[in-house]
Image: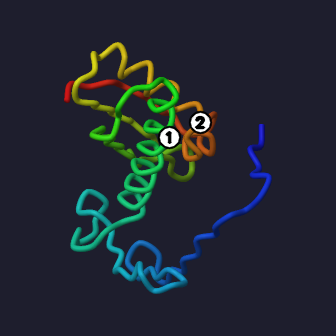
Amino acid sequence: MTNTPTTIVYTASATTTGGRQGHAVSSDGILDLTLTAPKEMGGPGTGTNPEQLFAAGYSACFNGALMMVAKQAKLDASAAQVTVDIGFGPEGDSFAITADIAVAIPGLELAQVQELADAAHQVCPYSKATRGNVPATVKAVAA
């Protein structure tokens, strides 16, 4: 199933050169960083890498979705912490990723946090974009 916005309200644009050992710059120049492969993949590990960027973006997006579903449930998730671990490894003749999402919300029971996290996973744009292609787990953890 394709999830297409009815209206595009913002477009992010970035350009990279040199792949994993290169440079990335957003069109507005705010993001401007050196990319290096992690030590685990034979690189120097001295800069950021695509998996870190994806993890940060997914975490922020998921946290926003979490706050939205919590607000609908009349619960406070403003202090929520969402950690996304992006795994990278060989798959067939190329590579693939996994996503493990851990959600902590101070003041709420784990069962409640899990319910909110599962609901956020249904509406988060990153979750929708990767569903059915990237193995993902969503787990409530103690705050």
140 relative position to 12: left or right:
left
Task: Name the element at disc 1.
Answer: helix
- Tell me the quarter of the picture where residue 43 sits: bottom left
> At which x and y percent is residue 125?
59, 46
> At which x and y percent is residue 142?
21, 25
Q: Which residue is mark 1?
A: 65
Tell me: residue 20, above or below residue 83.
Answer: below
Q: Residue at coordinates 42% horizontally, 81% vertically from top-left?
A: 30
> At which x and y percent is residue 19?
47, 75
Q: Residue at coordinates 39% horizontally, 26% vertically from top-left?
A: 75
Quarter of the image where the C terminus is located: top left
Quarter of the image where the N terminus is located: top right
Q: Which mark is residue 123?
A: 2
> At which x and y percent is residue 84?
36, 43
61 relative position to 108: left or right:
right
Marks 2/1 in contact by CB < 8 Å: the verdict is: yes
Q: Amino acid at mark 2?
A: Val
- Tell me the quarter of the picture where residue 76 sits: top left
59 relative position to 16: left or right:
left
